[in-house]
Image (tube, rainbow, N blue to C red):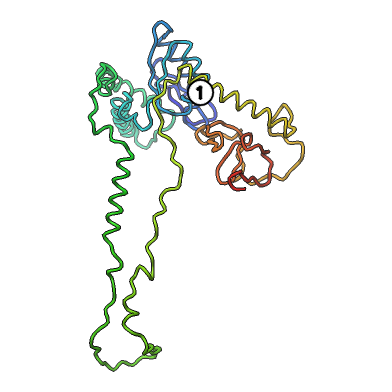
Amino acid sequence: MIIFKRKRMAPELTIGAISGTIVTISDTGYINNELFIKWLKHFIEYVKPSTEKKVLLLLDGHTTHSKNLEALILAKMHGIVLLQLPGHTTNRLQPLDVSFFKPMESYFSQGIETFLRSNPGNTVTQYNMTGLLSDAYAKTASISNIMGGFKRTGIWPVDRTVFSDADFIAASDLLENDSETAREDLGAINPRETTIEPEDEATERPVKSNSTKLNNNCNSTDLNTSIEEIYPLPENKGNAKKRKLSQPAVILSSTPYKDELEGKRNQRQNSIKKVKKNLGLSSTSLFEARDDQSSTSKSDVVNAQSEYDTTEWYCHICEENIIEDMVKCEKWAHTSCAGTKKQIKKYVCENCK
Protein backbone atom coordinates (compact mmCIF):
# COMPACT_ATOMS: atom_id res chain seq x y z
CA MET A 1 0.00 0.00 0.00
CA ILE A 2 1.31 3.43 -1.02
CA ILE A 3 -0.25 6.38 0.80
CA PHE A 4 -0.02 9.98 -0.43
CA LYS A 5 -0.83 13.06 1.60
CA ARG A 6 -3.59 14.55 -0.54
CA LYS A 7 -7.22 15.60 -0.44
CA ARG A 8 -8.20 14.11 -3.80
CA MET A 9 -7.06 10.99 -5.57
CA ALA A 10 -5.49 11.37 -9.01
CA PRO A 11 -5.18 8.50 -11.52
CA GLU A 12 -1.63 9.64 -12.35
CA LEU A 13 -0.51 8.53 -8.89
CA THR A 14 -0.88 4.88 -9.92
CA ILE A 15 1.55 5.12 -12.86
CA GLY A 16 4.26 2.48 -12.54
CA ALA A 17 2.58 0.54 -9.73
CA ILE A 18 3.17 -3.20 -9.49
CA SER A 19 0.10 -5.36 -10.08
CA GLY A 20 -1.83 -5.72 -6.83
CA THR A 21 -0.55 -2.49 -5.28
CA ILE A 22 -3.04 -0.30 -3.44
CA VAL A 23 -2.41 3.38 -4.16
CA THR A 24 -4.50 5.63 -1.94
CA ILE A 25 -4.50 8.94 -0.07
CA SER A 26 -5.04 10.25 3.44
CA ASP A 27 -5.17 13.68 5.03
CA THR A 28 -1.95 13.10 6.97
CA GLY A 29 -0.03 10.82 4.62
CA TYR A 30 -0.09 8.08 7.27
CA ILE A 31 -2.21 5.00 7.69
CA ASN A 32 -5.44 5.24 9.66
CA ASN A 33 -8.11 2.80 10.84
CA GLU A 34 -10.02 2.82 7.55
CA LEU A 35 -6.90 2.28 5.43
CA PHE A 36 -5.68 -0.55 7.64
CA ILE A 37 -9.02 -2.32 7.25
CA LYS A 38 -8.77 -1.78 3.49
CA TRP A 39 -5.27 -3.28 3.46
CA LEU A 40 -6.39 -6.19 5.65
CA LYS A 41 -9.18 -7.06 3.20
CA HIS A 42 -6.60 -6.89 0.40
CA PHE A 43 -4.36 -9.22 2.41
CA ILE A 44 -7.22 -11.68 2.93
CA GLU A 45 -8.03 -11.67 -0.79
CA TYR A 46 -4.49 -12.64 -1.80
CA VAL A 47 -3.38 -14.88 1.10
CA LYS A 48 -6.79 -16.55 1.57
CA PRO A 49 -6.46 -17.49 5.26
CA SER A 50 -9.17 -19.42 7.09
CA THR A 51 -9.97 -20.69 10.55
CA GLU A 52 -8.62 -24.09 9.46
CA LYS A 53 -5.47 -22.59 7.90
CA LYS A 54 -4.48 -19.71 10.13
CA VAL A 55 -1.91 -17.05 9.28
CA LEU A 56 0.37 -15.16 11.68
CA LEU A 57 0.63 -11.41 11.06
CA LEU A 58 3.31 -9.48 13.01
CA LEU A 59 2.46 -5.87 13.88
CA ASP A 60 3.86 -2.98 15.88
CA GLY A 61 1.87 -1.15 18.55
CA HIS A 62 0.38 1.57 16.35
CA THR A 63 -3.16 2.47 17.36
CA THR A 64 -4.48 1.64 13.89
CA HIS A 65 -3.60 -1.97 14.75
CA SER A 66 -4.07 -2.28 18.50
CA LYS A 67 -7.19 -0.09 18.94
CA ASN A 68 -8.96 -0.93 15.69
CA LEU A 69 -11.82 -3.14 16.85
CA GLU A 70 -13.30 -3.64 13.37
CA ALA A 71 -9.94 -4.89 12.10
CA LEU A 72 -9.58 -7.32 15.02
CA ILE A 73 -13.04 -8.76 14.37
CA LEU A 74 -12.28 -9.12 10.65
CA ALA A 75 -8.98 -10.86 11.37
CA LYS A 76 -10.56 -13.30 13.83
CA MET A 77 -13.29 -14.19 11.33
CA HIS A 78 -10.71 -15.17 8.71
CA GLY A 79 -8.24 -16.99 10.95
CA ILE A 80 -5.57 -14.27 11.09
CA VAL A 81 -3.54 -14.19 14.30
CA LEU A 82 -2.52 -10.57 14.91
CA LEU A 83 0.56 -10.53 17.15
CA GLN A 84 1.66 -7.17 18.53
CA LEU A 85 5.41 -7.17 19.19
CA PRO A 86 6.78 -5.70 22.44
CA GLY A 87 7.62 -2.01 22.40
CA HIS A 88 10.98 -0.92 20.97
CA THR A 89 11.79 -4.41 19.67
CA THR A 90 10.67 -4.27 16.05
CA ASN A 91 14.21 -3.44 14.92
CA ARG A 92 15.21 -6.93 16.10
CA LEU A 93 11.98 -8.94 15.86
CA GLN A 94 10.20 -7.59 12.77
CA PRO A 95 11.49 -9.36 9.62
CA LEU A 96 10.75 -6.34 7.41
CA ASP A 97 12.81 -4.07 9.67
CA VAL A 98 15.67 -6.55 9.79
CA SER A 99 16.13 -7.47 6.13
CA PHE A 100 13.81 -5.47 3.89
CA PHE A 101 13.42 -1.77 4.58
CA LYS A 102 17.10 -0.80 4.61
CA PRO A 103 17.99 -2.32 1.20
CA MET A 104 14.73 -0.98 -0.23
CA GLU A 105 15.68 2.49 0.96
CA SER A 106 19.06 2.15 -0.75
CA TYR A 107 17.48 1.05 -4.04
CA PHE A 108 14.97 3.89 -3.78
CA SER A 109 17.75 6.47 -3.32
CA GLN A 110 19.60 5.02 -6.30
CA GLY A 111 16.43 5.24 -8.37
CA ILE A 112 16.01 8.92 -7.52
CA GLU A 113 19.61 9.66 -8.50
CA THR A 114 19.17 7.82 -11.80
CA PHE A 115 15.93 9.70 -12.50
CA LEU A 116 17.54 13.09 -11.86
CA ARG A 117 20.50 12.28 -14.12
CA SER A 118 18.22 11.07 -16.90
CA ASN A 119 15.91 14.08 -16.58
CA PRO A 120 18.11 17.15 -16.02
CA GLY A 121 16.20 20.16 -14.81
CA ASN A 122 13.26 18.09 -13.54
CA THR A 123 12.32 17.30 -9.96
CA VAL A 124 10.80 14.22 -8.37
CA THR A 125 7.08 14.77 -7.78
CA GLN A 126 4.30 12.65 -6.33
CA TYR A 127 3.53 11.35 -9.79
CA ASN A 128 7.02 9.79 -10.00
CA MET A 129 7.00 8.25 -6.54
CA THR A 130 4.92 5.15 -7.30
CA GLY A 131 7.17 4.07 -10.15
CA LEU A 132 10.36 4.67 -8.15
CA LEU A 133 9.01 2.81 -5.12
CA SER A 134 7.81 -0.08 -7.27
CA ASP A 135 11.25 -0.48 -8.86
CA ALA A 136 12.94 -0.48 -5.45
CA TYR A 137 10.38 -2.95 -4.10
CA ALA A 138 10.89 -5.33 -7.02
CA LYS A 139 14.67 -5.36 -6.46
CA THR A 140 14.33 -5.90 -2.71
CA ALA A 141 11.53 -8.48 -2.57
CA SER A 142 13.72 -11.47 -3.31
CA ILE A 143 13.22 -14.88 -1.75
CA SER A 144 16.61 -14.73 -0.02
CA ASN A 145 15.83 -11.38 1.62
CA ILE A 146 12.43 -12.51 2.87
CA MET A 147 13.73 -15.82 4.22
CA GLY A 148 16.72 -14.06 5.78
CA GLY A 149 14.45 -11.72 7.71
CA PHE A 150 12.52 -14.57 9.32
CA LYS A 151 15.71 -16.51 10.03
CA ARG A 152 17.61 -13.61 11.63
CA THR A 153 14.68 -12.88 13.95
CA GLY A 154 14.40 -16.53 14.97
CA ILE A 155 10.79 -16.79 13.80
CA TRP A 156 11.27 -19.42 11.10
CA PRO A 157 13.00 -21.74 11.43
CA VAL A 158 12.27 -21.30 15.15
CA ASP A 159 15.51 -20.44 16.93
CA ARG A 160 15.32 -19.46 20.60
CA THR A 161 19.09 -18.91 20.76
CA VAL A 162 19.26 -16.29 18.01
CA PHE A 163 19.77 -13.55 20.63
CA SER A 164 22.52 -13.44 23.25
CA ASP A 165 22.09 -12.58 26.93
CA ALA A 166 23.35 -9.05 26.23
CA ASP A 167 20.28 -8.44 24.06
CA PHE A 168 18.02 -8.86 27.10
CA ILE A 169 19.63 -6.24 29.35
CA ALA A 170 16.83 -4.20 30.84
CA ALA A 171 16.72 -0.52 29.98
CA SER A 172 16.29 0.29 33.68
CA ASP A 173 19.72 -1.23 34.40
CA LEU A 174 21.31 0.97 31.76
CA LEU A 175 19.59 4.06 33.15
CA GLU A 176 20.67 3.16 36.68
CA ASN A 177 24.29 2.82 35.57
CA ASP A 178 24.12 6.20 33.85
CA SER A 179 22.70 7.86 36.97
CA GLU A 180 25.39 6.30 39.17
CA THR A 181 28.09 7.56 36.82
CA ALA A 182 26.59 11.04 36.94
CA ARG A 183 26.55 10.96 40.74
CA GLU A 184 30.19 9.88 40.82
CA ASP A 185 31.16 12.71 38.50
CA LEU A 186 29.21 15.16 40.62
CA GLY A 187 30.75 13.86 43.82
CA ALA A 188 34.25 14.38 42.45
CA ILE A 189 33.70 18.12 42.74
CA ASN A 190 33.97 19.20 46.37
CA PRO A 191 33.24 22.91 46.65
CA ARG A 192 34.20 22.94 50.33
CA GLU A 193 37.83 22.40 49.41
CA THR A 194 37.89 25.58 47.35
CA THR A 195 38.81 28.43 49.70
CA ILE A 196 40.59 31.73 49.35
CA GLU A 197 43.69 31.96 51.54
CA PRO A 198 44.74 35.43 52.73
CA GLU A 199 48.21 36.60 51.81
CA ASP A 200 50.77 36.67 54.61
CA GLU A 201 52.48 39.77 53.42
CA ALA A 202 50.98 42.56 51.45
CA THR A 203 53.12 44.36 48.94
CA GLU A 204 52.72 48.07 49.18
CA ARG A 205 52.22 49.68 45.80
CA PRO A 206 51.08 53.21 45.23
CA VAL A 207 47.91 52.98 43.18
CA LYS A 208 45.77 55.92 42.23
CA SER A 209 42.12 54.99 42.31
CA ASN A 210 38.75 56.61 42.90
CA SER A 211 37.20 53.40 44.24
CA THR A 212 35.73 53.14 47.72
CA LYS A 213 38.14 52.00 50.43
CA LEU A 214 37.64 48.53 51.87
CA ASN A 215 36.57 48.12 55.45
CA ASN A 216 39.61 47.67 57.67
CA ASN A 217 37.61 45.42 59.97
CA CYS A 218 37.55 42.66 57.31
CA ASN A 219 39.30 39.64 58.83
CA SER A 220 40.64 36.41 57.42
CA THR A 221 37.68 34.30 58.56
CA ASP A 222 35.46 36.02 55.98
CA LEU A 223 37.70 34.72 53.21
CA ASN A 224 37.26 31.07 54.22
CA THR A 225 33.58 30.94 53.17
CA SER A 226 33.01 28.05 50.77
CA ILE A 227 31.56 28.53 47.32
CA GLU A 228 28.79 26.09 48.18
CA GLU A 229 27.55 28.41 50.94
CA ILE A 230 27.56 31.39 48.59
CA TYR A 231 25.99 29.60 45.62
CA PRO A 232 24.60 26.13 46.49
CA LEU A 233 24.60 23.41 43.88
CA PRO A 234 21.18 22.73 42.34
CA GLU A 235 19.43 19.68 43.69
CA ASN A 236 18.47 16.88 41.35
CA LYS A 237 14.74 16.54 41.89
CA GLY A 238 14.53 13.66 39.46
CA ASN A 239 12.02 13.12 36.71
CA ALA A 240 8.58 13.49 38.23
CA LYS A 241 6.89 12.63 34.94
CA LYS A 242 4.94 9.41 35.11
CA ARG A 243 6.44 6.81 32.83
CA LYS A 244 4.11 4.73 30.73
CA LEU A 245 4.40 0.99 31.06
CA SER A 246 6.26 -0.72 28.26
CA GLN A 247 4.14 -2.21 25.51
CA PRO A 248 3.86 -5.98 26.00
CA ALA A 249 3.53 -8.66 23.36
CA VAL A 250 -0.20 -9.22 22.82
CA ILE A 251 -2.27 -11.40 20.50
CA LEU A 252 -4.64 -8.69 19.28
CA SER A 253 -7.06 -11.11 17.65
CA SER A 254 -7.51 -13.12 20.86
CA THR A 255 -10.94 -13.17 22.48
CA PRO A 256 -9.92 -11.59 25.84
CA TYR A 257 -8.25 -8.60 24.19
CA LYS A 258 -11.12 -8.15 21.73
CA ASP A 259 -13.68 -8.35 24.55
CA GLU A 260 -11.72 -5.80 26.57
CA LEU A 261 -11.65 -3.42 23.61
CA GLU A 262 -15.37 -3.90 23.03
CA GLY A 263 -16.04 -3.21 26.70
CA LYS A 264 -14.10 0.05 26.55
CA ARG A 265 -15.98 1.15 23.44
CA ASN A 266 -19.37 0.33 24.99
CA GLN A 267 -18.41 2.14 28.17
CA ARG A 268 -17.33 5.15 26.15
CA GLN A 269 -20.56 5.19 24.15
CA ASN A 270 -22.59 5.03 27.35
CA SER A 271 -20.55 7.89 28.76
CA ILE A 272 -21.23 9.98 25.65
CA LYS A 273 -24.97 9.28 25.89
CA LYS A 274 -24.92 10.30 29.54
CA VAL A 275 -23.12 13.55 28.76
CA LYS A 276 -25.58 14.30 25.95
CA LYS A 277 -28.46 13.82 28.34
CA ASN A 278 -26.91 15.96 31.09
CA LEU A 279 -25.97 18.80 28.76
CA GLY A 280 -29.31 18.77 26.94
CA LEU A 281 -27.75 18.32 23.50
CA SER A 282 -29.68 17.36 20.39
CA SER A 283 -29.40 13.90 18.87
CA THR A 284 -27.95 15.26 15.65
CA SER A 285 -24.74 16.54 17.15
CA LEU A 286 -23.10 16.02 20.50
CA PHE A 287 -21.50 19.45 20.44
CA GLU A 288 -24.38 21.68 19.34
CA ALA A 289 -25.21 23.61 22.51
CA ARG A 290 -28.53 25.39 22.98
CA ASP A 291 -27.06 28.43 24.66
CA ASP A 292 -24.84 30.72 22.66
CA GLN A 293 -21.57 31.08 24.47
CA SER A 294 -18.35 32.82 23.58
CA SER A 295 -15.99 30.57 21.71
CA THR A 296 -12.61 29.73 23.13
CA SER A 297 -9.28 30.34 21.51
CA LYS A 298 -7.92 27.90 18.97
CA SER A 299 -5.19 26.83 21.38
CA ASP A 300 -7.75 25.59 23.93
CA VAL A 301 -10.16 23.66 21.68
CA VAL A 302 -9.63 21.32 18.74
CA ASN A 303 -12.53 20.42 16.47
CA ALA A 304 -12.98 16.76 15.66
CA GLN A 305 -13.51 17.58 11.99
CA SER A 306 -9.92 18.79 11.66
CA GLU A 307 -7.62 16.43 9.82
CA TYR A 308 -5.05 15.05 12.25
CA ASP A 309 -3.39 11.72 12.74
CA THR A 310 -5.15 9.57 15.34
CA THR A 311 -1.99 9.54 17.46
CA GLU A 312 -2.44 13.28 18.03
CA TRP A 313 -5.84 12.76 19.73
CA TYR A 314 -4.51 11.29 22.98
CA CYS A 315 -6.76 11.98 25.96
CA HIS A 316 -5.12 11.86 29.39
CA ILE A 317 -8.42 10.86 31.01
CA CYS A 318 -9.38 7.79 28.97
CA GLU A 319 -5.79 7.29 27.71
CA GLU A 320 -6.99 6.54 24.18
CA ASN A 321 -6.40 8.04 20.73
CA ILE A 322 -9.92 8.71 19.46
CA ILE A 323 -10.84 11.54 17.12
CA GLU A 324 -13.33 13.70 19.03
CA ASP A 325 -13.65 17.32 20.06
CA MET A 326 -11.04 18.15 22.67
CA VAL A 327 -10.44 20.79 25.33
CA LYS A 328 -7.21 21.70 27.09
CA CYS A 329 -6.23 22.67 30.61
CA GLU A 330 -2.64 21.53 31.11
CA LYS A 331 -3.21 18.47 28.91
CA TRP A 332 -5.69 17.63 26.18
CA ALA A 333 -8.87 15.72 26.99
CA HIS A 334 -11.95 14.69 25.06
CA THR A 335 -14.89 16.93 25.91
CA SER A 336 -17.01 13.85 26.55
CA CYS A 337 -14.46 12.52 29.04
CA ALA A 338 -14.14 15.91 30.71
CA GLY A 339 -17.94 16.26 30.91
CA THR A 340 -17.95 19.72 29.39
CA LYS A 341 -19.04 21.53 26.25
CA LYS A 342 -16.80 22.58 23.40
CA GLN A 343 -18.02 26.17 23.77
CA ILE A 344 -16.82 26.45 27.38
CA LYS A 345 -14.86 29.66 27.92
CA LYS A 346 -12.21 28.19 30.21
CA TYR A 347 -11.73 24.55 31.14
CA VAL A 348 -10.08 23.54 34.41
CA CYS A 349 -9.49 19.83 34.99
CA GLU A 350 -10.00 18.03 38.29
CA ASN A 351 -6.26 17.95 39.02
CA CYS A 352 -5.97 21.74 38.79
CA LYS A 353 -9.06 22.61 40.84
Estimate the x, y position of residue 151 in percent, counting from the top left: 25, 20
Residue at 39 percent of width and 58 percent of height: 235
Residue at 59 percent of width and 48 percent of height: 352
Residue nearest the observer in this picture, 48 or 267: 267
Amino acid found under the numbered disc labelled 1 = Asn
Estimate the x, y position of residue 263 in percent, counting from the top left: 56, 22
- Residue 226: quadrant of the picture: bottom left
| SS state under label 1 | loop
Is residue 266 shown left or right of residue 139? right
Residue at 24 percent of width and 90 percent of height: 203
- Residue 295: quadrant of the picture: top right
Q: Residue furthest top?
A: 52
Q: Which residue is mark 1?
A: 68
Density class for disc 1 (Cα within 10 Å; few <14, some 14-19, many ≥20) is some
Is residue 200 shown left or right of residue 244? left
Is residue 25 shown left or right of residue 106? right
Residue nearest the observer in this picture, 138 or 180: 180
